[in-house]
Image (spheres, helix red, strand yellow):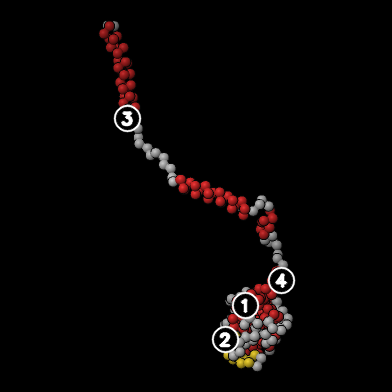
Amino acid sequence: MSDAHLKNSHQQPVQNEISELALHDKEMREIAEPYEAPTTGPKWFYLFMVISLAIGSFYLGRHMGKLDASIHIGFFEKNKPADTSAVTAAQSPASGASLFTSKCASCHQADGKGLPGAFPPLAESEFVLGNPERLISIVLKGLTGPLEVEGQSFNGTMPAWEDQMSDQELVAVINHIRNKLGNNQASEIQLQDVQKVREQTASRTQPWQADELEVAYP
């Protein structure tokens, strides 16, 4: 093998190695891809977030309750039958007075004595102290036309309250009228009394007139 051939064989790998280094060097000199530098928000925003977290943590700590099963007693006893009769009996006077004030006193006055020639009295009235089903019917369906109460004549219209008050509310306000106005002292009505009259008069769409009441509830 000649010396020239050997020389060329040794020079070829060296040249290849130099060319590869040059290629890498070229790539290394390329400009890196641009990137967006991180930015920070305004300082007041971070301060606001810190204060909000502190206030929220304080509020939750005060109002979220303790890890005590007693705070969930309503869920534990949701299927337990409630003694509504005792509650209704205890609350009827107060709720009855409130209902009378908000729905009846503007016409019949707070003392139940009405206004002469305009609104009939409820205190010591035979319509109140007589057959309780008659009063229930009047409150449910309303009353219109000429009417004589305690020797006074009236001719107006009382609105129906059947869609405005529940049976429990009707019991409360009627018992208040029969026992708390003036010298009224009448027997208390019960929930089943209102339910009975409501069912009996369900098909009636017009307010009562005095002569009809005398026939229906003598």
Return the x and y of residue 155 as percentages of the image width and height: 58, 90
Mark 2 or mark 3: name the one nearer the start of the chain: 3
What residue lies at 68% left-to-right and 61% top-to-bottom?
79
What residue lies at 69% left-to-right and 55% top-to-bottom?
70
Q: Is residue 85 above or below residue 7?
A: below
Return the x and y of residue 130 as percentages of the image width and height: 70, 86
Tell me: 32 left or right of 201.
Answer: left
Q: Label 2 belongs to which residue?
A: 157
What residue lies at 67% left-to-right and 56% top-to-bottom?
71
Return the x and y of residue 211 as percentages of the image width and height: 62, 91
Q: Residues within 10 Å of mark 4 (few under 14, many from 20)?
A: few
Q: Label 3 belongs to which residue?
A: 30
Return the x and y of residue 44 as percentages of the image width and height: 46, 48
Quadrant for the N terminus, please.
top left
Rounded to the nearest whole Å, what is the CA distance between mark 4 and mark 1?
Answer: 19 Å
Please, what is the three-letter code of the amino acid marked with disc 1?
Answer: Thr
What residue lies at 69% left-to-right and 75% top-to-bottom?
93
Residue 64: mark: none
Viewer-nearest of discs 4 and 1: 1
Mark 4 or mark 1: name the one nearer the start of the chain: 4
Please tell me whether mark 1 sits on a helix, a strand or a loop.
helix
Q: Label 4 belongs to which residue?
A: 90
Q: Residues within 10 Å of mark 1 (few under 14, many from 20)?
A: some
Tell me: 85 left or right of 106.
Answer: right
